[in-house]
Image (cartoon, helix red, strand yellow):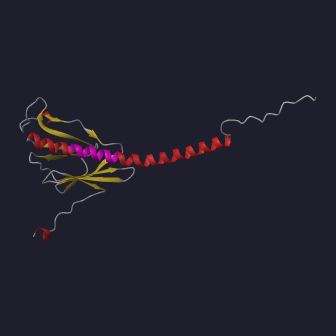
Amino acid sequence: MSPSRAPHAAPAKRAGFSLVELMGVIVIIMLIGTMVSISWQAIVPREQLNSDVRSLAAALQGARSNAIARNSEFRLIYDLDNDRYRTMTPYRVGGGLWTMADDQADRQVTTWQELADGVEFSRIVVDGEEYDEGDIYVRFDPLGTASDHTVTLLHQPYGNTYTIEVLALTGLIRFHEGEFRREPPREEELE
């Protein structure tokens, strides 16, 4: 009998992926990551502006609600030079109602709310008069009425604008994407 030889075993298959397959997956992941990064950068600026619009609207609505609930005049102060705002209450710092005889510095105010980086007040119109610098005061009275005004916020690097309109008779707020200017009524509309 001839010596038997062991059958040749087939070479073992390697488990895993080849280098070419791994490189292909890495390239696909990098492409997806780049697309997500670009999409995120486009979304973030709009969200910064939207966040400031919502915060300012909440401050306006809060001033109006407090004026009605507490039967006193509340004010909102816009600091156009530093792009910030805050609410001025009708109360003294030590307690009690503020009166005309009291010093203005004794009046209780909230902390300044800063606008996000790159977001600024581009224009504020109060009772038809346009302002672009200084401190601007608008009022909300106990009946719910307010100073008729519009506030336009601009996100400078991207040129996005949003306008908040406060209606004088009701103190309610309207939102307008872009720059909004209310035209005064024409004489024939009043007849």
Task: Quadrant for the N terminus, please.
Answer: top right
Q: Quadrant of residue 85?
A: top left
For the magenta stretch, what is the residue range? Answer: 48-59
Q: Quadrant of residue 182?
A: bottom left
Q: Which x, y percent locates residue 43?
A: 40, 48
Residue lying farthest right?
1
What's the residue at 13%, 69% (across, down)?
187
Please tell me whether residue 58 belongs to the stretch shown in magenta.
yes
Q: Which x, y percent locates residue 154?
A: 32, 51
Q: Nearer the viewer, residue 121 or 23?
A: 23
Can I make out residue 139 in this image? yes
Q: Which x, y percent locates residue 139?
A: 14, 46
Q: Which x, y percent locates residue 174?
A: 22, 53
Q: On screen, 144 above or below 109?
A: below
Can I make out residue 79 in this image? no
What's the residue at 11%, 41% (across, down)?
69
Residue lying farthest front?
1
Q: Would you say 150 lies left or right of 49 here?
A: left
Q: Nearer the viewer, residue 191 or 16?
A: 16
Task: Quadrant for the C terminus, please.
Answer: bottom left
Please tell me whether residue 147 belongs to the stretch shown in magenta.
no
Q: Would you say 16 lies left or right of 191 here?
A: right
Q: Would you say 78 lies left or right of 17 here?
A: left
